[in-house]
Image: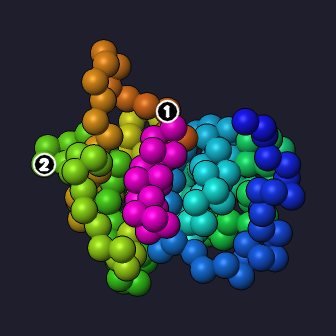
Amino acid sequence: MRKLSMDELNRKSVDEFRKAEKIPVVVVLDNIRSMHNVGSVFRTADAFLIESIYLCGYTPQPPHRDINKTALGATETVAWEYFPSTLEAVVALRQKGYGVYAVEQATDSYLLNRIDTDLDEKIAVVFGNEVSGVDSEVLKHCDGCLEIPQLGMKHSLNVSVAAGIILWELVRERIG
């Protein structure tokens, strides 16, 4: 076994990425505090050809060196928009025909390993603040909650880790 070279990986250029058909998934970041988490979500969104990221409230916005530190250039490829409030972003997405789901442990949540999505469905996923989660007012405007099954003692994940798990689950069948 040998490690592949950059040429063998067939990576897209920035221009090729921008022109590529995207997976119809929008990531919504609800008052995320950490610039490193924001950068990591950008990097993951790039990896999975996610349509865009909505940065809401006090979530840090590019350009910033601490975001770039983990994004590794993904802020130049992944489309993003800023909204003063997450609720405004959710309302805009619903008007565009997106199903909107919060990533949250809640009553009647959908376990991620048991969801079945239409491959053509436009989906937005809302990731909440590192401490308080998705705002309760935002939850009222979502179609439901997605929950990552967790088996250990701690029942929470870092937001960037949760984003990686959720986004992979939403795109894996679409690329299969």
With respect to residue 167, does 26 lie above or below?
below
Start and end of the magenta stretch? 161-176
Given the image, on which type of amino acid does mark 1 rest? Asn
| Nearer-N-terminus badge (2/1) | 2
Query: Is residue 124 in sight in this rendering?
Result: no
Choose between 85 and 166: the one closer to the eye: 166
Question: What amino acid type should be assigned to the residue bearing mark 2?
Answer: Asp
Count of numbered marks? 2
Measuring from the top left, give residue 131's x and y in whole percent. Answer: 44, 32
Residue at (83% x, 44% y) in the render: 65
Q: Residues within 10 Å of mark 1 (few under 14, many from 20)?
A: few
In this figure, which residue is indicated by the disc labeled 2? 108
Give percent across and percent down for residue 84.
Answer: 54, 63
> Element at badge 1?
loop
Dot 2 falls on a residue whose secondary structure is: loop
Check the image and report above or below for 163 versus 91.
Answer: above
Q: Is residue 84 above or below residue 99?
A: above
Q: CA distance from mark 2 to mark 1?
A: 22 Å
Residue at 27% in and 47% down: 113
Residue identified by numbered label 1: 158
Q: Residue at x 22, y 51 (%)?
A: 114
Residue in the foreground of this view, choosing between 94 and 157: 157
Residue 145 in percent (x, y) is at: 26, 52
Magenta-span inclusion, residue 135: no
Q: Quadrant of the N terminus?
A: top right
Task: Please say if 139 is above or below 66.
Answer: below
